[in-house]
Image: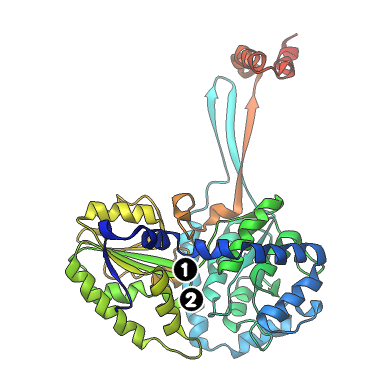
């Protein structure tokens, strides 16, 4: 049996279709009770609980005073990291900086909505933000760039990073180099649900923040969703296990399609990769190429081959549709994190897409360009979250506050309207506050 099954859309069994569309959300829901125990424990016991979970899940024995990365560790990371990787980080940072700088709204604006009534907005940054940077299945200096750069552009003053320690008790050198380069030195060696809880409630060592952003696995995703119930910390959105979908017609190169559909599945067994195509012939060629590419994936030091095989078995498929309109309808319903469009007229196809975290057009735009260096953000909504949310941007780190200025003439202009509505709604003091100004 082929690793990646081919379905005709109208013939996909409902159980398989529900599984494909549900993807990692199914796994996040299954562990919710376990995550709640961790979140509550960290809330109640602070650092003691955090170090116990670091030892349990990361197999690293730390004392509370060692959770914060020291300046010596930053210095060591800078000295040991190879120069070519430093240049990659710096080049990626430049493009990410340019893209996100363009997102920054004006600091203030106003308009006169009626005679003597000026209404406007001012833009202010959030005070403190916690940034989650994954670990364990790989190194993620790119996530440091993707989260810190828009936060800095927005003007956030207090930034703290939580990221899992490696077995030797250290944090990935490239991640530390990126953080140091961007001026963030509050980096804590803690990952998983315990990191999200620590930033949400604060511990003796880890500061409480106003908002938490960043991607993570099912435990991180479940914890981010859970802390919303406590009402004291915001999140960006659920940026859980990675997923991508390639939309292709018969003009697409099957080798490109196959290479790209495996980009996210190599992240982990809970990731997803799907191809939607109008061509059965292309589907069969892609199926064959996928098996070749999986066979070439490494098994050490991290078993990427097993990750890709498992994720394709659970949440992967090649879906054949009758026409492009039917394919686009499925794409909008699936609402994927990363969407690649390989059609004859990708810009025309783009205009019909309503739901996707980030979109990559044409033969030379694999979604890995967004993961690293083209400038677009790779922290994106997963699990159909693209129906509601946009990818991480400067907007996630700012608030826009309305302001109003009325002259006496302006207040006179809406006097009768305010009094009429306040009386109808049953709030007499609202109207009286206007009336006393004319007595």
**Residue 242 bears which disc, if any?**
1
Which numbered disc, 1 or 2, marks the residue that appears first in the sequence? 1
Q: Quadrant of residue 175?
A: bottom right
**Residue 268 bears which disc, if any?**
2
Q: Quadrant of residue 39?
A: bottom right
Q: Nearer the viewer, residue 401 or 233?
A: 233
Q: Is residue 213 left or right of residue 275?
A: right
Q: Which residue is drawn at the image coordinates 19% and 67% (left, top)?
A: 280
Contact between marks 1 and 2 (CB within 8 A): the answer is yes
230, above or below 70, in the image: above
Report whether residue 36 is seen.
yes
Q: Quadrant of residue 368?
A: bottom left
Label 1 neighbour load within 10 Å: few <14, some 14-19, many 20+: many
Q: Which residue is drawn at the image coordinates 71% and 84% (left, top)?
A: 60
Picture quarter with the N terminus: bottom left
Percent of width and height locating residue 299:
45, 89
Percent of width and height locating residue 263:
39, 74
Label 2 neighbour load within 10 Å: few <14, some 14-19, many 20+: many
Q: Nearer the viewer, residue 103 or 29?
A: 29
């Amino acid at each position: 049996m082929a690793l990646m099954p081919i379905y005709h859309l109208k013939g996909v069994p409902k159980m398989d279709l529900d599984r494909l569309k549900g993807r990692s959300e199914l796994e996040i829901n299954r562990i919710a009770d376990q995550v709640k125990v961790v979140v509550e424990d960290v809330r109640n016991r602070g650092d003691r609980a955090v170090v116990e979970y670091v030892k349990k899940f990361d197999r690293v024995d730390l004392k509370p005073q060692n959770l914060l990365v020291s300046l010596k560790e930053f210095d060591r990371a800078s000295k040991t990291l190879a120069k070519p990787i430093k240049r990659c980080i710096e080049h990626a940072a430049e493009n990410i900086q340019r893209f996100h700088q363009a997102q920054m709204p004006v600091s203030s604006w106003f308009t006169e909505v009626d005679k003597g009534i000026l209404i406007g907005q001012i833009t202010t940054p959030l005070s403190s933000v916690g940034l989650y940077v994954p670990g364990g299945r790989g190194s993620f200096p790119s996530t440091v760039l993707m989260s810190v750069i828009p936060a800095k552009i927005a003007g956030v003053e207090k930034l703290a990073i939580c990221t899992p320690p490696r077995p030797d008790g250290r944090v990935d050198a490239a991640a530390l180099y990126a953080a140091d380069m961007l001026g963030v030195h509050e980096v804590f060696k803690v990952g998983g649900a315990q990191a999200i809880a620590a930033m949400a409630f604060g511990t003796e060592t880890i500061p409480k923040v106003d908002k938490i952003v960043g991607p993570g696995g099912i435990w991180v995703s479940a914890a981010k969703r859970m802390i919303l119930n406590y009402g004291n910390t915001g999140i960006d959105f659920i940026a859980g296990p990675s997923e991508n979908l390639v939309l292709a017609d018969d003009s697409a190169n099957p080798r490109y399609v196959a290479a790209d559909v495996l980009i996210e599945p190599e992240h982990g067994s809970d990731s997803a990769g799907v191809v939607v195509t109008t061509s059965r012939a292309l589907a069969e060629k892609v199926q064959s190429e996928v098996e070749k590419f999986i066979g070439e994936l490494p098994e050490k030091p991290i078993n990427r081959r097993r990750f890709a095989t498992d994720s394709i078995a659970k949440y992967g498929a090649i879906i054949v549709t009758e026409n492009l309109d039917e394919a686009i309808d499925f794409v909008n319903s699936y609402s994927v994190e990363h969407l690649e469009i390989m059609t004859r007229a990708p810009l025309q196809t783009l205009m019909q897409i309503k739901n996707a975290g980030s979109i990559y057009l044409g033969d030379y735009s694999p979604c890995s360009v967004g993961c690293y260096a083209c400038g677009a953000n790779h922290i994106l909504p997963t699990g159909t979250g693209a129906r509601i949310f946009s990818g991480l941007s400067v907007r996630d780190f700012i608030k826009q506050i309305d302001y109003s200025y009325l002259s006496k003439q302006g207040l006179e202009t809406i006097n009768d309207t305010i009094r009429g509505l306040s009386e109808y709604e049953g709030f007499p003091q609202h109207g009286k506050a206007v009336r006393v100004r004319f007595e």
